[in-house]
C-alpha cells in the first residue's frame, strides 16, 4: 500500500525540515526535492563563510562568491514543487510524539512579517554550521575572509609567492607552515607573546622559518595586504595571515534534542549523517563521525554531507511508510 500523499495538504507535517541555508542545507533540500519529499528549508541568513569574498577548492565553483553560489542553489530549488524555502530562523527543535516540533522566530512572506510559528516535521536535518571565535587581536576581524583565513586548502593558493604569517604557538603552527612552504615565498610565525614548544621551535628553525615572539598589537590593511604591528620591534608587511579559530555550535538545537557530542564540539553522526536521536540528521561542519578528529570545513564536503544525510532521512521515512 502506498504512503499517503501529503504534498498538497498544508496542515500535514513536513516530511523533512532542513534547518540551515548553507551548502549542506541547500544540497539536502535538493536531494529531498528530487525524491518528491515535502520539504521545508529554513534559512536564517547567517553563514559561516559569509566573510569570505570567494570560495575555493570546489570543482566547477573554484573562485565563486558564496552569495552567488547560494543564489544559484536557490534558483535550482525553485524547480521542485515539494520544496519550500523560508527566510526564517528556527528557535527550537524538540521531539513531539513520533515527530518533531520546529519553532520559528518572526518570518517573512508575501504579506510581510508575522509572528512566531510552530511547525511539525517527521524528520529533521540540521545544517546550522559552526561559529568561529577569532583570537582577540585588534584589526583581525575586518581582515578575516580576505587577508586572514584558517584553511590553507581553501585560501592558500591565492597567496602564492607572498610573505605569509602564521599566528599562534600551538601544535597547528608547524602543520600550517609546512602546508604553505610550497606556496608562500616567505613564512613568519607570530607567537603573540607565547612560548613555543622546543620541538616546534626546532622544526621551524630547521625549515628556515622566522619567528616573531613579541605580542601583536594590531593588524591593519596595507598595500602588501596587511601590516602587523607589535608591542615592540619593527612592523611586518605580509600578504596573508593564517589563524587558528575556536569554534562552537552556531545554534542551540543539539542541546535541545540531547544529541551525543564529540570532544571537538561537533555533533556525533554515523556515516549516513544519523545522530544519536532517531529522526534527526546532521550535515556540514556542525557534525562529523567519531573516526575524524574534527569537522571537514569546506563547501564541497558540506554539500556532500547534505546529500548523504538527506538520502538517509528519505530512506528512514521510506521504512516508516512501508514497514516490513
Image: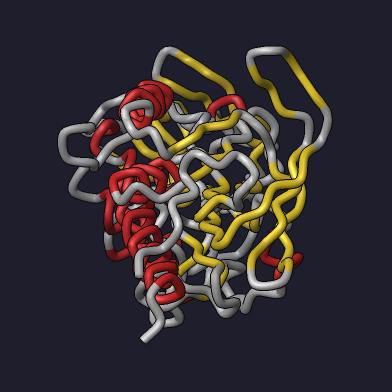
The figure's colour scheme reads secondary structure
* Residue positioned 40% across, 27% down in the render: 74
Left or right: where does residue 310 sit relative to residue 282? left
Residue 116: x, y in percent?
A: 81, 36
Quadrant of the rendering where the C terminus is positioned: bottom left
Quadrant of the rendering where the N terminus is positioned: bottom left
The image quadrant of residue 309 is bottom left
* Residue positioned 39% across, 76% down in the render: 319
Residue 61: x, y in percent?
A: 22, 32
Q: Is residue 100 above or below residue 236?
A: below
* Residue positioned 50% across, 55% down in the render: 15
Q: Looking at the image, which is closer to me, 218 or 306? A: 306
All told, the count of numbered labels is 0
Residue 10: x, y in percent?
A: 60, 39
The residue furthest front is: 1
Q: Is residue 127 visible?
A: yes
Left or right: where does residue 48 sit relative to residue 131? left
Left or right: where does residue 216 sit relative to residue 41? right
The residue furthest right is: 115
Left or right: where does residue 159 sit relative to residue 290? left
Residue 72: x, y in percent?
A: 33, 24
* Residue positioned 48% across, 24% down in the render: 226
Q: Is residue 140 visible?
A: no
Q: Is residue 270 above or below residue 315?
A: below
Q: Looking at the image, which is closer to me, 66 or 226? A: 66
Q: Looking at the image, which is closer to me, 40 or 72? A: 40
Amino acid at each position: 500500500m502506498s504512503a499517503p500523499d501529503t504534498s498538497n495538504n498544508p496542515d500535514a507535517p513536513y516530511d523533512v525540515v532542513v534547518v540551515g541555508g548553507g551548502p549542506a542545507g541547500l544540497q539536502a533540500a535538493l536531494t529531498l526535492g528530487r525524491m518528491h519529499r515535502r520539504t521545508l528549508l529554513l534559512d536564517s541568513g547567517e553563514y559561516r563563510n559569509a566573510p569570505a569574498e570567494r570560495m575555493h577548492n570546489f570543482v566547477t565553483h573554484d573562485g565563486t562568491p558564496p552569495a552567488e553560489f547560494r543564489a544559484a542553489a536557490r534558483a535550482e530549488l525553485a524547480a521542485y514543487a515539494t520544496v519550500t524555502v523560508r527566510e526564517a530562523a528556527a528557535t527550537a527543535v524538540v521531539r513531539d510524539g513520533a515527530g518533531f516540533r520546529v519553532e520559528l522566530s518572526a518570518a517573512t512572506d508575501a504579506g510581510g512579517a508575522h509572528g512566531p510559528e510552530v511547525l511539525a516535521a517527521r524528520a529533521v536535518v540540521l545544517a546550522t554550521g559552526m561559529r568561529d571565535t577569532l583570537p582577540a587581536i585588534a584589526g583581525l576581524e575586518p581582515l578575516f575572509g580576505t587577508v586572514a583565513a584558517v584553511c590553507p586548502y581553501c585560501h592558500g593558493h591565492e597567496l602564492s609567492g607572498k610573505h605569509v604569517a602564521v599566528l599562534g604557538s600551538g601544535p597547528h603552527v608547524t602543520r600550517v607552515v609546512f602546508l604553505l612552504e610550497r606556496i608562500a615565498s616567505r613564512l613568519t610565525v607570530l607567537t603573540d607573546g607565547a612560548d613555543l614548544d622546543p620541538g616546534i621551535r626546532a622544526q621551524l628553525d630547521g625549515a628556515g622559518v622566522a619567528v616573531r615572539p613579541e605580542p601583536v598589537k594590531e593588524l591593519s590593511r596595507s598595500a602588501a595586504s596587511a601590516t602587523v604591528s607589535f608591542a615592540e620591534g619593527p612592523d611586518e608587511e605580509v600578504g596573508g595571515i593564517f589563524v587558528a579559530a575556536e569554534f562552537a555550535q552556531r545554534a542551540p538545537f543539539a542541546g535541545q534534542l540531547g544529541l551525543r557530542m564529540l570532544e571537538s564540539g561537533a555533533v556525533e553522526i554515523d556515516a549516513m549523517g544519523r545522530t544519536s536521536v532517531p529522526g534527526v540528521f546532521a550535515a556540514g561542519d556542525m557534525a562529523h563521525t567519531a573516526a575524524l578528529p574534527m569537522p571537514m570545513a569546506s563547501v564541497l564536503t558540506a554539500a556532500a554531507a547534505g546529500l548523504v544525510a538527506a538520502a538517509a532521512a528519505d530512506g528512514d521515512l521510506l521504512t516508516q511508510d512501508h514497514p516490513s
